[in-house]
Image (tube, rainbow, N blue to C red):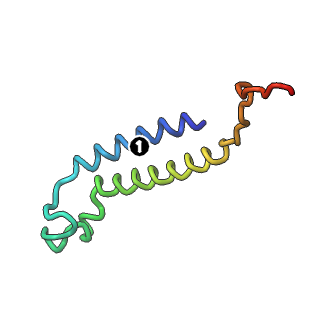
Amino acid sequence: MFTFILVVQAIVAALLVTVILMQKSEGGGLGVGGSPAGLMSARGAADFLTRSTTVLASIFVLLSIVLAVIASVQHAPSDIDTSLVKQAPAA
């Protein structure tokens, strides 16, 4: 189960990177510059790439949380192997 979810997350991550790189650059990183309409317009919010980025990012975060929960539940404390401990000579 863990491996399957991990593979799905890798696929979602690759799709997320692809969708982000396909988007048109608005210019002026961190909201500096660009048109005032930008992503807040009705057309920008309804854009397919914007919506797919939101959905893929949400799925990625959800899968990350699920993987963290599964990893913490499956983690069992291990016993210390004492087979190599040097035996003290009997006096």
Give left or right: position of 21 versus 52: left
Please give the name of the residue rendered at 50% of the width and 53% of the height, measured from the top-left corner.
Answer: 62
The residue identified by callout 1 is 12
Residue 75 higher or lower than 36, as above or below: above
Please give the name of the residue rendered at 50% of the width and 38% of the height, measured from the top-left corner.
Answer: 6
Q: Residue 75 occupies which quadrant of the picture? A: top right
Give left or right: position of 60 versus 65: left
Residue 66, horizontal then vertical, whole percent: 56, 49
Residue 88, horizontal then vertical, whole percent: 78, 28
Extreme residue toward the right, this view:
91
Residue 21 higher or lower than 82, as above or below: below
Residue 90, horizontal then vertical, whole percent: 85, 26
Residue 34 higher or lower than 63, as above or below: below
Residue 46, horizontal then vertical, whole percent: 30, 62
Q: Amino acid at mark 1?
A: Val
Please give the name of the residue rendered at 66% of the width and 42% of the height, measured from the top-left corner.
Answer: 74
Label 1 sits on a secondary structure element that is helix
Give left or right: position of 66 versus 57: right
